[in-house]
Image: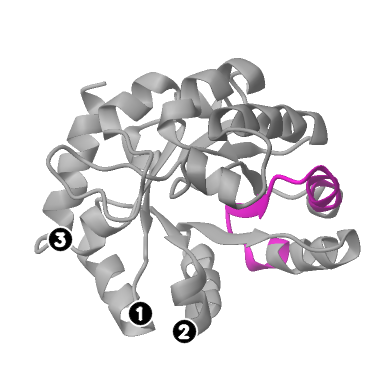
Amino acid sequence: MHFAEADTMRDRLIVGLDLPTLKDAERAVRELEGSISFYKIGYQLAFAGGLDFARELASGGTKVFLDMKLLDIDNTVAKGVENIVKMGVSMLTLHAYPKAMKAAVAAAKGSDLCLLGVTVLTSMDEQDMIDAGYEYDPHTLVLRRSEQALHAGMGGIVCSAEEAEAVRRIVGPDMAVVTPGIRPSGSDHGDQKRVVSPAQAIRNGSSHLVVGRPIVSAPDRRAAAEAILAEMQSA
């Protein structure tokens, strides 16, 4: 399957359950039933019962993107991935460091888990990179890490939609290009510094869009999700 040609836009929109409690997350999933079939669980919910919720969703046929951004010594990454495979989730993030990626790929071999390399966080701009001690600007580092992820055998890349087109040229049609920092027309950018509209992200080559606050903080979550899906269809 070419990730850039997923069956429908509904398969390509991932809702970030960036919510404080399991009760809040369960309510969001109920409200979005029928519109959304793919959810992201990150740190906030993971430490409030979200890992068991991820297993529950996955066992019921719902796709789960576990956003853990793993990074550790090779053996620790590998052992973590081995247990995450057993959870039945669809996607897992780790920071795109070559040794960590190779360890994760070996641990996930033979499973359906799509491993995603996080290139540069979408909250970071060039000054942030300098402050963190990197010698590369965000765009250059994203492309370098994308090439390393391809060579490591990863399933996909996480990057800003601004970089999706260049990343797609590097990784080809088969790898996932997952883009957070998506903001529909007229919405607040929050703490994201490199943001793109849903339609532009699709045009740029994104296979999956991750949208959190514009949906889960909306007064009518289903309407917000359907509006974003409509924007994606217009690409």
In the image, what residue type sits under mark 2?
Ala
> Vertically, is 152 above or below 68?
above
Give the residue drawn at x 67%, y 53%: 94
- Cβ–Cβ below 8 Å for labels 1 and 3? no
Q: Residues within 10 Å of mark 2 (few under 14, many from 20)?
A: some
Q: To which residue does mark 3 refer?
A: 218
Outermost right residue: 75
The reply, left or right, for residue 195 in relation to residue 77 is left
Residue type, mark 3 in image? Ala
Judge left or right: residue 128 versus residue 195: right
Q: Earlier in the sequence, mark 1 or mark 3?
A: 1
Q: Quadrant of the N terminus?
A: top right
Indicate which disc, 2 or 1, sits on the residue closer to the N terminus: 1
Q: Is residue 74 magenta?
A: no
Part of the protein shown in magenta = 85-105
Q: Residues within 10 Å of mark 3 (few under 14, many from 20)?
A: few
Question: Is 93 in the magenta?
Answer: yes
Inter-mark Cα distance, 2 to 1: 7 Å
Q: Which mark is residue 48?
A: 2
Quarter of the image where one finds residue 67 = bottom right
Q: Is the Cβ of the residue at disc 2 closer than 8 Å to that at disc 1?
A: yes
Q: Secondary structure at mark 3?
A: loop
> Which amino acid type corresponds to the residue marked 1 in the rendered image?
Pro
Q: Earlier in the sequence, mark 2 or mark 3?
A: 2
Work out which quarter of the rendered image holds the C terminus and state it.
top left
Mark 2 near mark 3, Cβ–Cβ under 8 Å?
Answer: no
Q: Residue, x 58% and y 15% (percent of image)?
A: 169
Q: CA distance from mark 1 to mark 3?
A: 15 Å
Residue 71: x, y in percent? 73, 60
Asked whether, in this view, residue 136 is left or right of residue 81, the answer is left
Q: Which mark is residue 20?
A: 1
